[in-house]
Image (spheres, rainbow, N blue to C red):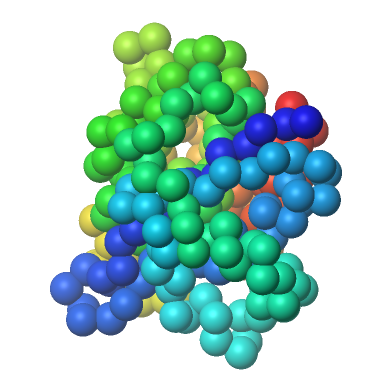
Amino acid sequence: MRNILMVVTSHDQLGNTGRKTGFWLEEFAAPYYVFQDAGAKITVASPKGGQPPIDPKSDEPGNQTPAMTRFKSDKAAQAVLASTVKLSTVNAADFDTVFYSGGHGPMWDLAEDKKSISLIEDFYNSGKPVAAVCHAPGVLHHVQYQGQPIVKGKRVTGFANSEEEAVHLTTVVPFLVEDELKRLGGKFEKAPDWESFAITDGRLITGQNPASSTAAAQALLALL
């Protein structure tokens, strides 16, 4: 049985807009069921532990998906999400891999979280794959491998500048995922906005947007 760690944000403020953010529900629900249906053991962690904030926009009527519908009738999965473990208590040695769900929240907390940074480095240094979808590739921006940015020279994707422009948040987020991955030496690729697109390069898996959540999770399982 594969032992998979999923990491979500604890941050709920969308910059200084006064609006709420958090993790994108599809980016938790879709991978969660890909992993569960494959028989994996799943642990969910967040910086603060407990119930993490769901981005309210992710649960709007136009954003509903089959995985989200399934989650809303799944009391066991809801209980798992409501009681996430504190990230500070997690050890990479206890898991086969880690998957970071996106949403705008991780741009503020996980991207700068020293425990998260060291945890990703521990996974990668021990030969284990790391996956992140949508805004979550932004959590890699301080992560190093052999003294270089982990994304340097790697084919990567993430929430594209054009997608950030479409949701009018380019001046709200701390940095743009696409620009940052390029700055760090990543070979950034993208599909047309909002289409599913995931890249595997070695032990690093990245997905572009919410629609890429299933593909990124499936790619991670294939690598395992």
**In the depicted view, which residue is nearer to us: 92 or 156?**
92
- Residue 197 vertical placement versus 167 (above, below): above
**Image-quadrant location for residue 204:** top right
**In the depicted view, which residue is nearer to us: 203 or 72?**
72
Residue extending farthest to the top is 146
Residue extending farthest to the bottom is 61
**In the depicted view, which residue is nearer to us: 88 or 190?**
88
- Residue 87 vertical placement versus 29 (above, below): above
Residue 126, image x and y in percent?
53, 13
Residue 105, image x and y in percent?
35, 61
Residue extending farthest to the right is 38
In the rendered image, the quadrant that contains the C terminus is top right
Is residue 160 visible from the viewing direction of this image?
A: no
Residue found at x 26% / y 70%: 13
In the rendered image, the quadrant that contains the N terminus is top right
Residue found at x 52% / y 76%: 58
**In the image: residue 143, left or right of residue 155:** left
Residue 108, image x and y in percent?
27, 54
- Residue 25 vertical placement versus 176 (above, below): below
Residue found at x 34% / y 58%: 10
